[in-house]
Amino acid sequence: MSPPVNPDTSKAPPEKRAELDDAPPVLGSWRNIYLFVVGVFVLFVSLTWTLTWVYS
């Protein structure tokens, strides 16, 4: 049985894709998307808490 063949390390690593560094198409930046998601979460929690308090 022959030993496993090592992968060819002489090849250069692939270049970084520029589109991965682009801003997201919605809201302009990842920070804004994260803030939106947190805001929606807080809104849902507040709404759920309010409805629970009103109808309990």
Image: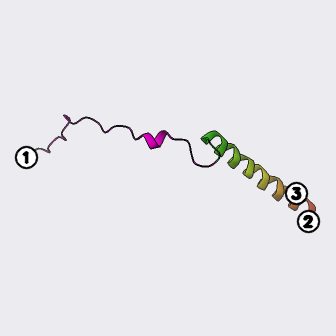
Identify the mark at residue 2; answer none if there is no mark. 1
Sequence order check, earlier mark of 2 and 3? 3
Mark 3 touches mark 1? (CB < 8 Å): no
- At 40% from the left and 41% from the top, the residue drawn is 17
Where, by quadrant of the figure, is residue 48 drawn?
bottom right
The colour mode here is: rainbow
Residue type for callout 1? Ser
Tell me the distance, in whole angstroms, between the alpha carbons under discs 3 and 1. 69 Å
Q: Residues within 10 Å of mark 2 (few under 14, many from 20)?
A: few
At 17% from the left edge and 40% from the top edge, which residue is drawn? 6
Q: Which mark is residue 50?
A: 3
Give how far across and how far down residue 18 sits, in percent: 43, 40
First in residue order: circle 3 vs circle 1: 1
- What residue is shown with label 2? 55
Q: Is residue 13 magenta?
A: yes
Q: Nearer the viewer, residue 44 or 15?
A: 15
- Circle 3 crowding by C-alpha within 10 Å: few under 14, some 14–19, many from 20: few
Task: State the CA–CA distance, disc 2 to disc 3.
Answer: 9 Å
**Cβ–Cβ under 8 Å for marks 2 and 1:** no
Start-end of magenta stretch: 1-26
SS at circle 2: loop
